[in-house]
Image (cartoon, rainbow, N blue to C red):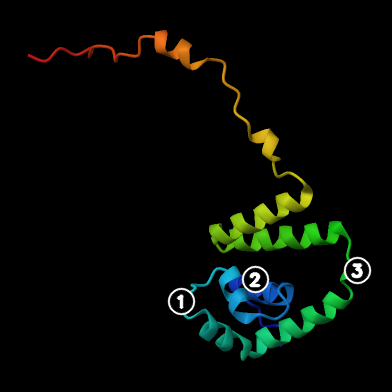
């Protein structure tokens, strides 16, 4: 069983299943599967031996989660990101990278998103914004 690898989505399903307390339908949706038939998809996934084994193993790891360092979590997230990029699963890679940036504290704060303008509305009204005449004359 150890030599069988899960796809990125299957691994994400297992992670979400553990994270949300065992709600399969929510885990399916959170891991990128369609919302249509999500409960059926969850049932199908939960009977797969490799998924059940991974969930069992992750539940055991969850018990030991208190001893996992931030560095280890960052390393695992980075490895998932690299796997997703190698498989050309850019949407998954982007999601993982977003989680990684949040974990590392790189996500911009709301106050950092302010756009500073050097012109007032009144100043813009006084500028001539008429398009220039075409350089090529038409005969």
Quadrant, the N terminus = bottom right
Q: Secondary structure at mark 3?
A: helix
How many angstroms separate mark 2 from mark 3 (CA)?
A: 21 Å
- Give left or right: position of 89 versus 54: left
- Give left or right: position of 133 versus 6: left
Name above or below for residue 43 compared with residue 129. below
Q: Earlier in the sequence, mark 3 or mark 1?
A: 1
The residue identified by callout 2 is 12
Q: Are marks 3 and 1 in contact (CB under 8 Å)?
A: no
The residue identified by callout 1 is 36
The residue identified by callout 3 is 66
> Alpha-carbon neighbours of circle 2 within 10 Å: few (<14), some, or many (≥20)?
many
Mark 2 vs mark 1: in front: 1
Say the numbered circle drawn on residue 78: none
- Residue 119 lies, in percent from the top left, at 53, 15
- Residue 124 lies, in percent from the top left, at 44, 14
């Amino acid at each position: 069983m150890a030599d069988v690898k899960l796809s990125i989505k299957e691994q994400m399903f297992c992670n979400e299943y553990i994270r949300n307390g065992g709600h399969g339908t929510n885990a399916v949706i959170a891991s990128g599967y369609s919302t249509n038939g999500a409960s059926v998809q969850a049932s199908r996934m939960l009977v797969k031996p490799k998924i059940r084994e991974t969930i069992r193993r992750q539940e055991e790891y969850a018990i030991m989660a208190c001893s996992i360092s931030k560095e280890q979590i960052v390393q695992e997230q980075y490895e998932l990101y690299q796997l997703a990029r190698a498989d050309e699963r850019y949407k998954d890679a982007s999601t993982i990278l977003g989680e990684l940036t949040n974990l590392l504290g790189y996500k911009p704060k709301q106050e950092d998103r302010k756009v500073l303008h050097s012109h007032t509305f009144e100043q813009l009204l006084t500028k001539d914004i008429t398009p220039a005449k075409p350089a090529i004359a038409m005969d």
